[in-house]
């Protein structure tokens, strides 16, 4: 009887913390684990029978701080908890505030590599807003470590974008974005164009009339992760695979829920959560 009560209490705790029993052992929060790094969430895929890719999710400004549950409000970790199956390790660091630090992100990645069976040729990064900036800067700084990247409604602060030209890169920004003006993504693209064949590995969706928050829905699309994981550092000439998914306000609204659990409602992404 005592064991049964203990089991029921454990299940109740899992439900109250928002982590389903199927994810209880595969989604872990690490604090103070990596010197000169970030606190981070780490997800292990159900099947670890061989080397697995790593997906790095970089959140936006509204999730900064020291409450790690904020990182579960939207994005890749939330997509997993809502039923999105991703056959990869996922690391989701939490930025305490300010700009993302590429070196700190890489220090967390090195810990992940040292402690898991990682396919080091298949490391991917994606983020939006502040995380979009982090994605651009990280990819430009470590182009020989990142196999592909997706940057949503962000920009960049690097003086040299030559590294971006080496990596398959998908940038998305809406022209009606009032939080981060589309000109910041335009500036990154224009900087890449200064190099010979500089945008050969770039797909830029400059979406007319799209606002800032709606792009958080991209993190829930299976096509997002399928495109990322179709790339490898071993691909001949780092070939850019075609982007076949057309991003519009309509497609993001109607396609987001495929494969997710029963929480299919229009409030899945709250406006204030996706900055």
Image (spheres, rainbow, N blue to C red):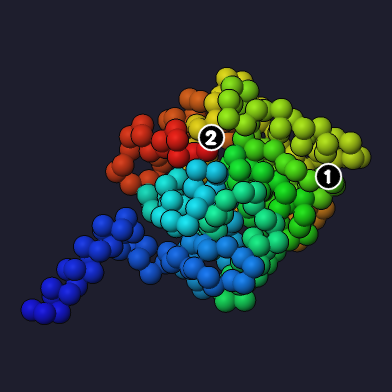
User: Does residue 165 appear left or right of residue 3 in this picture?
Assistant: right
> In this rendering, is residue 61 above or below 125?
above
**Foreground residue, 135 or 150?**
135
Residue extending furthest toward the top: 209
Residue extending furthest toward the left: 1
> In this rendering, is residue 131 above or below 214?
below
Residue extending furthest toward the right: 196
The structure residue drawn at horizontal position 36% and vertical position 31%, both measured from the top left corner, is 266
Q: Which mark is residue 95?
A: none
Q: Identify residue for label 1.
A: 159
Q: Identify residue for label 2.
A: 215
Residue 221 can be seen, yes or no? no
SS of the residue under disc 1: loop
Sequence-earlier tag: 1 or 2: 1
- Label 1 Cα crowd, 10 Å radius (few <14 / some 14-19 / many 20+): few
The structure residue drawn at horizontal position 17% and vertical position 75%, both measured from the top left corner, is 6
User: Does residue 161 appear left or right of residue 182 in this picture?
Assistant: right
SS of the residue under disc 2: helix
User: Does residue 98 appear left or right of residue 232 in this picture?
Assistant: left
- Label 2 Cα crowd, 10 Å radius (few <14 / some 14-19 / many 20+): many
Q: Position of residue 64 (x, y in %)?
A: 52, 50
Q: Position of residue 112 (x, y in %)?
A: 59, 70
The structure residue drawn at horizontal position 33% and vertical position 47%, both measured from the top left corner, is 261
């Amino acid at each position: 009887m005592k064991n049964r009560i203990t089991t029921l209490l454990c299940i109740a705790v899992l439900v109250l913390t928002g982590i389903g029993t199927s994810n209880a052992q595969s989604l872990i929060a690490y604090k103070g684990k990596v010197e000169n790094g970030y606190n981070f969430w780490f997800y292990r895929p159900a099947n670890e029978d061989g080397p697995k890719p790593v997906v790095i999710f970089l959140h936006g400004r509204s999730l900064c701080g020291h409450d790690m549950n904020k990182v579960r409000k939207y994005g890749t970790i939330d997509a997993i908890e809502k039923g999105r199956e991703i056959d990869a390790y996922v690391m989701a660091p939490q930025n305490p505030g300010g700009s993302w630090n590429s070196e700190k992100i890489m220090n967390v990645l090195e810990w992940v590599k040292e402690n898991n069976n990682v396919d080091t040729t298949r490391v991917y990064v994606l983020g939006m807003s502040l995380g979009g900036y982090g994605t651009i800067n990280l990819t430009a700084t470590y182009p020989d470590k990142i196999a592909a990247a997706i940057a949503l409604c962000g920009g960049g602060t690097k003086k040299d974008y030559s590294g971006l030209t080496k990596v398959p890169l998908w940038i998305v920004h809406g022209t009606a974005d009032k939080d981060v003006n589309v000109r910041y993504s335009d500036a990154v693209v224009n900087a890449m164009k200064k190099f010979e064949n500089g945008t050969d590995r770039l797909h830029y969706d400059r979406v007319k009339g799209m606002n800032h928050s709606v792009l958080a829905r991209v993190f829930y699309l299976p096509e997002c992760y399928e495109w990322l994981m179709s790339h490898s550092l071993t691909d001949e000439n780092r070939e850019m695979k075609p982007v076949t998914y057309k991003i519009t306000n309509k497609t993001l609204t109607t396609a987001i829920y495929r494969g997710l659990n029963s929480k299919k409602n229009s409030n899945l992404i709250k406006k204030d959560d996706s900055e």
